[in-house]
Amino acid sequence: MPRTTCILRPWPLLLAIAVLLAAIGAPAAGAGETPASRPSPDRRVLIVASFHFTHQWSQDIIRAIRHKLATDLNGCIIDYLELNAVRNSPDEIDERFQSFLPGIKAGKYDCVIAILDDAIKLLRKHHEAIPQTVPLVVYSNHGIVDQIRAVHANSTGINGQIDLEKNVELGLLVLPDSQEALIIVDPADASADLTRSIQQKTAAFTSCRVRVVNGGSFSYLELLAMTRQLPAKSFVVLGFYRDYSRDGYGSMVDFARNFFAECPRPCLVPTSLSLTNGSLGGSTSKGTNNGETLAEMVLQTIKNGQADKIRIAKEHTNFVIDIAIAKRFNVSIDDLPDNVLLINKTYSLWETNKAEIILLTGIVLSLSALTACLIVISSRSRRNAELSQLNRQLSQAVADAQQAAQAKTMFLATMSHEIRTPLNAVIGFSELLQHDHIPPAQQKEYLQAINVAGVSLLNLINDILDLSKIESNQMYFATARTDFRALCRDIALIFRHRLDETGLALSIRDAADFPWVYVDARRLRQILLNLVGNAVKFTHRGGIIIDCQFSPSDDNRGTLIIKVSDTGIGIPKDNQSKIFEPFIQDESIRGTRAEENSTGLGLPIVKRLIERMGGTLTLNSEKDLGSCFTIELPNVAFSRRQPTDHDGDENQASSDKTGTGTVTDTTKGNPPPELSLLLVDDVAMNLKVLAMMAKRLGCQTHSSSSGLKALTMLEEGLRPDIVLTDIWMPGMDGFELARRIRANDDWSSIRLIAISAGSMSDGEAEQCLFDVFLQKPVTLACLRAALFR
């Protein structure tokens, strides 16, 4: 049978909008201004609103009031007082309201609007302080507006309807065979009266048992258990508009959504806010409709100067059923009366837009015929163009595939050579060392060769990994304040022995007031090590110069310029662009000792690192005259040195000092103190190597094969100076062990050192648990620096 439904027909609606816009854009001759544009004397209204339904219900009402007043009462000033019982105590709410009372008494407001129970309580509490001349417009439930008018005649408003008995009536309408209806009421001040009223009004439903419970007396789980005990033919009416079961005010919307999802029986609600959240429907009203009615009452009150002549309105409710939920509970909707509004009904496109579809079909057929003609005319030329394009793409794809295959073959061949060369030394000398009667001097020579080959292999792997990170855009930079002069002196210290052996001079040129710069010191050190290392490698006479300059562009930023020049063999012009490609070497070094120590990865990594840092690398070189590499890093933040700043260790190389003997060995001096170490690693060989290295450095060691065993040793009283642990171990890993140690105040003096084969960027948050992070393989020098830093 017919009933109220909502069917959207877009084409008539669009035509109506177009006509309306035309009427607005071109008013008839002599027509006056619209109501919103007519000037009116300033009016002032005070809105006092309770915090309800996670603010949604009162906000729907307030939004409608604001829109109506802005449209029909141009220039109206609205003061707004929100009574938020979630954030404020009753005394604080009362104090805020009293701050508005002087203005109310002085006639500052043309009208005072009170919305829902907290606002009503304040009006009733302070009604003697509010002059009768001040009009009140009130929205409340339970017929309270009539009570307000009894003590304040100059008032009107809307009596809200929480007709839970209407929901029972609707439930019996759609579920006529129901044996029981469970009504859960709001545990508010009016619940006792509301419960008695509902019990009286539902007494007439003799065919169905109606039970009313106070939701505040039960937990959420107890309410759900209660619904599961209902007969199969039953329904629930949820009257909550606040959830007190979870520490004060709560959201009915959230509460109802969760409740509907878990309740095994269909649920009805008295408010539209909970529709489409899983409820079957209900006898509901809308906040926006109430807001428009209240705004109309305010307009009439301001116009008449009084509210006592305006009739108190009763909130209008509608029967609403959600078709989707009805299908879920197998509820028939075929015999519902006309006054039931159906929502979420699915209509076919043909049902809703039959005429429009016919019109569009004709248009589409006409356009299709026209398009077909155009396609026939242009198809041949287009096919020829597409064929040519496909041939070009195919040729390019073949070329790219061949180039990729060639690059892959070249890479594998190069890597095979570069990896097998140091491995040949490692395996060969290791076999020689297994024989007896090898002189000590020759043993030392073999061991040094194995060490050099291992370091060479490690450098090759690191270079490949760095290049891979750069090419895949996985290289990250950590900017920090850096003493660049000290960094250059560190570079000089690293190459000191090689400079002594070759007799070369290394000069560092910088200004005495060279500022602090904010760069990634680790990557900048890597760049300089590569450039200076190449200069030392390919320079046989003369020297090397590191020239550092900083050119400020403003008070905070500038350009860092670094030049590394040498008097070496130089690079021919035709080879200068090639040396920045991976595994490419200058032909002039073929067959020399320098070729043995070069993989062809250093300069490509340097160039890509500089470009990722936003800078440029340029080369100026002539064969047999030397080379000069210039780095420019723009937009570098800096801070000027203060008189209290120092350049670091005085024993390090200072600027403008050259050659050998300018750097003092800072590792010599007093012997380091004896330390107690707890070594943790699940690999026995790693534990043995670390223990031997630590004993070589004069340390006492305790070993543990797992993080759990190490923690047990600490709990049993072991107090080492340092815990040196591997990161990736089965069971309790190094991160978890560090967290446990840091959490115990009795172990706060223990230093933590991490060892891992992973990248330094593995979990920056986790690394902060450790004092030092070492990467495998660990050398004796690295271990010494970490232990005695």
Image: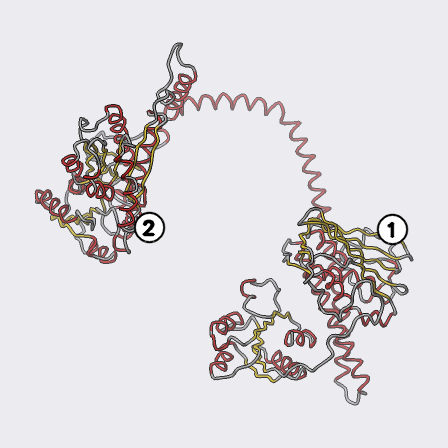
Which of the 4 image quarters holds residue 159? top left
Q: Secondary structure at mark 1?
A: helix
Work out whether 87 lies above or below 292: below
Say which quadrant the N terminus sits in: top left
Q: Amino acid at mark 2?
A: Arg
Residue 671 vs residue 150, the one in the foreground:
150
Give the percent coordinates (x, y) of residue 142: 17, 40
Residue 699 vs residue 111, the one in the foreground:
111
Mark 2 is surrounded, within 10 Å at the Cα level, by few (under 14), some (14 to 19) or many (20 or more) other residues, namely: few
Q: Residue at x 31, y 49 (%)?
A: 254
Give the percent coordinates (x, y) of residue 298: 26, 29
Disc 1: which residue: 573
Residue 260 vs residue 313, the one in the foreground:
313
Name the outermost residue toward the bottom: 437
Work out whether 305 lies above or below 744: above
Q: Which marked residue is nearer to the observer: mark 1 or mark 2?
A: 2
Disc 2: which residue: 87
Q: Is residue 603 left or right of residue 695?
A: right
How many marks are shown on the rendered structure?
2
Q: Is residue 741 left or right of residue 309?
A: right
Q: CA distance from mark 1 to mark 2?
A: 75 Å
Say which quadrant the C terminus sits in: bottom right
Give the percent coordinates (x, y) of residue 440: 80, 87
Give the percent coordinates (x, y) of residue 287: 28, 36
Residue 659 vs residue 26, the one in the foreground:
659
Is residue 402 visible in the rendered structure shown here?
A: no
Q: Is residue 489 left or right of residue 306?
A: right
Q: Residue at x 90, y 65 (%)?
A: 541
Which of the 4 image quarters holds residue 480? bottom right
Q: Amino acid at mark 1?
A: Lys
Mark 1 is surrounded, within 10 Å at the Cα level, by few (under 14), some (14 to 19) or many (20 or more) other residues, namely: few
Q: Secondary structure at mark 2?
A: loop
